[in-house]
Amino acid sequence: MTFAALCLIAALTACGPQPREGLPEVASAPAFSPDEDNPVLARVNGSPIRHDDVLREAIAQRGPGSEAPDPVYGDEEFMRVLGELIDQRLLAQEARNRGLHRSEEARRRLAAAEERIIGTVLIAEILENATSEETLRAIYEQQVRLLRLDEEVRARHILVETEEAALAAKALLDAGEDFRELAIRISQDYATRLDGGDLGYFTRDGVLPAFGAVAFATPEGAVSEPFRTQFGWHVLLVVDRRRQPPPSYEELRPRIGQYHGYEQLEDLLRELRAGDAVQRFQPPEAEDEALENQSEEPG
């Protein structure tokens, strides 16, 4: 298991249904007390739709991996889903009035939907409850040891327009001028000037190639010779060097937990598939085609 694999989990999100153009009018829904745990938000021919029904449907539409906050009553997303559930309930009631729920097609679809729902509940239980904090931390520590971490440099720089100005700045620094104070006074990088030219920590790939080449070739505590980039002339001071810190446990915990949960799910499926639990059959047409192909092969 690698961090690259962990990062794939973030991409495994399903798109929910597209918002409908017109939102149903729900302003006349009965008022509810904020103290009620799961208030009724609508009744469709007497059949209640509760707050948690809407919340579960909204979360399901987002798909796994979503880190967005839960929608609340009054939000566009919440009201859209409430309207969809109202329409869905109306259509289901009308289908029953017409006796469609007793048809063979409806029964087949209901059975398939029941299997999907129960299986999804099992998956959610595995992902949520099957992993301890000790296991997750052990996985994190294992991956941190395998992770390739780049070197980082912390530097200050002074940006000026001309080589002459850069040479003059370097002469002042060689004479003992404080780098931070000189950057505040003359640097034309207005994003960092008031911080004394402080660029923070960066990797070689995180800056311009010419800038990175000088920064990573300059010893810690030393001032570089003037050099040029597309922005002008620079003089830089290397303040510190360090190995790039790994992502924290708190940052990676959700993805590690989800990935480990899926591993446990795969283990369970392998166990359930073992033995004679699953039998596969070919349709008659496929068997006939296989026999024809065998008879056509040269003896």
Image: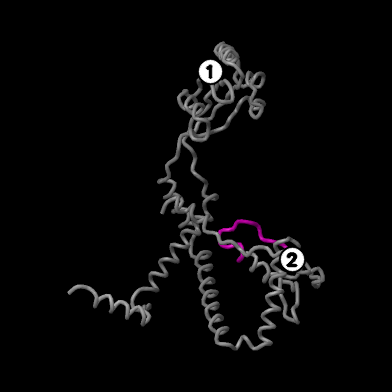
Residue 248 in the image, given as x and y percentages of width and height: 52, 46
Kindly identify the residue that appears in the image at 75 percent across and 77 percent down. 43
Ranked by sequence position, the earlier of labels 1 and 2 is 2
Residue type at mark 2: give it: Gly
Asked whether, in this view, residue 146 is left or right of residue 211, the answer is: left
| Residue 85 vs residue 283, the one in the foreground | 283
Question: Which label is found at residue 22?
Answer: 2
> Measuring 52% from the left and 25% from the top, which residue is drawn there?
238
Q: Position of residue 150 (x, y in %)?
A: 45, 37
Q: Nearer the viewer, mark 1 or mark 2?
A: 2
CA separation in Å, label 1 and label 2: 62 Å
Give, as a three-letter code, the residue at label 1. Answer: Pro
Q: Tag 2's secondary structure?
A: loop
**Which region shows up in magenta?**
60-72
The C terminus - image quarter? bottom left
Q: Nearer the viewer, residue 75 or 149?
A: 75
**Which is the main secondary structure of the residues drawn in magenta?**
loop
Name the foreground residue: 234 vs 22.
22
Quarter occupied by residue 91: bottom right
Q: Quadrant of the N terminus?
A: bottom left
Classify 284 as above or below 215: below
Asked if residue 71 lies in the magenta stretch, the reply is yes
Tell me residue 82's x, y (percent): 71, 69
Disc 1: CA contacts within 10 A as few (<14), some (14-19) or many (>=20):
many
Confirm whether the magenta stretch covers residue 282: no
Query: Which residue was labeled with disc 1?
Result: 226
Residue shown at 74% from the left, 72% from the top: 39
Spot occupied by residue 47 in the image (x, y as percentages of width and height) = 72, 80
Q: How many marks?
A: 2
Q: Is residue 38 above or below residue 47?
A: above
